[in-house]
Amino acid sequence: MARRDRLPLSLQVYQRATRLAVPFAGALLAMRLRRGKEDPERISERRGVATLERPAGPLIWAHGASVGEVLSLLPLVERQADRRHAAGHEIGKEIAAVEHRGQRAQ
């Protein structure tokens, strides 16, 4: 009898593969850095260390891999922000940084 809370096999395999890859992450990042594929000033972000302080209050985090994807996300982010504001939450509507191919927009 199958348990309902058990993860699908594909997700189990992904989780195990990810765990096995962890010891190699540092070497892979070092190699990418030497080859010029990573920005030395932002390499800590690849390790999960934020370089910007998180703003206070609620945060809507959305990711798009291209300019088109980011633009398509804006209405969703605006709608979620409007809902939170209508519920009495004080929020600001700002986009902190937009990046394209690893280059931070100014």
Image: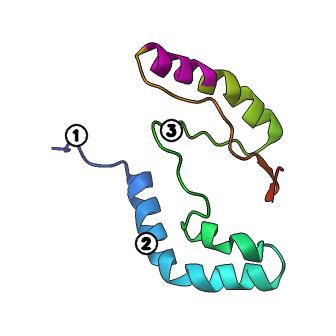
**Is the N terminus in the top left, top right, bottom left or bottom right quadrant?**
top left
Q: Within the image, what quadrant is residue 26 found in?
A: bottom right
| Membership of 81 in magenta stretch | yes
- Residue 50 position within the rendered picture, expressed as x and y whole percent measured from the top left: 57, 63
- Residue 34 position within the rendered picture, expressed as x and y whole percent measured from the top left: 79, 86
Q: Is residue 68 above or below residue 28?
A: above
Find the distance from the CA under tag 2 to the CA under tag 1: 24 Å
Residue occupied by mark 1: 4
Q: Are marks 3 and 1 in contact (CB under 8 Å)?
A: no
**Residue sitting at x 53%, y 51%:** 54
Magenta residues (range): 78-86
Q: Which three-letter amino acid code belongs to the residue tagged 3?
A: Leu
Question: Does residue 81 appear left or right of residue 87 in this picture?
Answer: right
**Residue sitting at x 82%, y 56%:** 101
Q: Residues within 10 Å of mark 1 (few under 14, many from 20)?
A: few
Q: Which three-letter amino acid code belongs to the residue tagged 1?
A: Arg
Residue occupied by mark 3: 59
Q: Secondary structure at mark 1?
A: loop
Q: Which mark is first along the chain, 1 or 3? A: 1
Closest to the observer, 53 or 103? 53
- Residue 88 position within the rendered picture, expressed as x and y whole percent measured from the top left: 41, 18
Q: Which three-letter amino acid code belongs to the residue tagged 2?
A: Arg
Residue occupied by mark 2: 19
Q: Which mark is first along the chain, 1 or 2? A: 1
Name, please, the residue furthest toward the top.
86
Question: Does residue 38 appear left or right of residue 57 in this picture?
Answer: right
